[in-house]
Amino acid sequence: MVHLLSSQHDDDKVCAYLQNKRNMIIDYNASKGGVDHADQLIREYSCSRRTARWPYRLFMNVIDICASNAFILYNEKNPDWQKNNYSRRRLFLLQLGDDLARNYMVKRSHYKNHTDRVKTALRDCGVVMDDQHIPKPQAPARKRAKCYECPRKDDRKVNITCTVCSKFVCELYRKKEQTYVCTKCFST
């Protein structure tokens, strides 16, 4: 059962040659084809997601309608753009989304503290990060350890390692050339 309400029609006339349809339905089908076509376009590529929150659903529907209208206006202004490409509406929507989000991504790239995931995502989107906000890799903190050649009772803590064997050596057990080398490695 279908309920009809019209401000244009005030009678129940039925058109016999069109499967006994009422005049209201015939007029609606004749004049409202654009609505059905717009709904079909919007359903094809929609930004709407399933949600129980009706304001969110309404907002997403407005975004879809605006994107569809923007595509129609863009085609009127640029009729030769991607003329033979069947997925040109998809390409337009991708470019539209990128252009709408670009200013926010650039603004966000100027923030100081980013996780590695955010940095990677921004770079993947083509946003150039400011060098001043990218932390420079720091040299590892120089550890201090006991000299491996000193007797245990001396227990000398040093932070210089042998460049050959990478063991910690104190000034008594190392030879200084251009780099520090322990006496065992120097003699071999």
Image: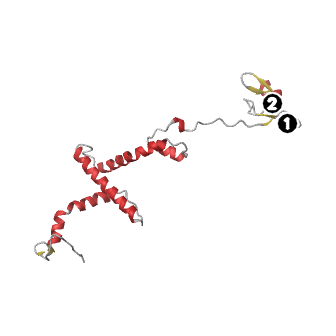
Q: Nearer the viewer, residue 149 or 188?
A: 149
Residue at the far top: name it.
177
Label 2 sits on a secondary structure element that is loop
Q: Viewed as shown, does residue 50 lie left or right of 7? A: right
Q: Is residue 22 above or below residue 89?
A: below
Q: Which amino acid does label 1 sit on?
A: Asp
| Residue denoted by label 2 | 170
Q: Quadrant of the N terminus?
A: bottom left
Q: Quadrant of residue 185?
A: top right
Q: Viewed as shown, does residue 161 lie left or right of 10? A: right
Q: Residue at x 21, y 59 (%)?
A: 34
Residue at the far left: name it.
17
| Residue denoted by label 1 | 155
Q: How far apart are marks 2 and 1 (CA)?
A: 10 Å
User: Is residue 121 at all visible to an observer of this figure?
Assistant: yes
Q: Quick one: label 1, few (<14), some, or many (20+) residues within 10 Å? A: few
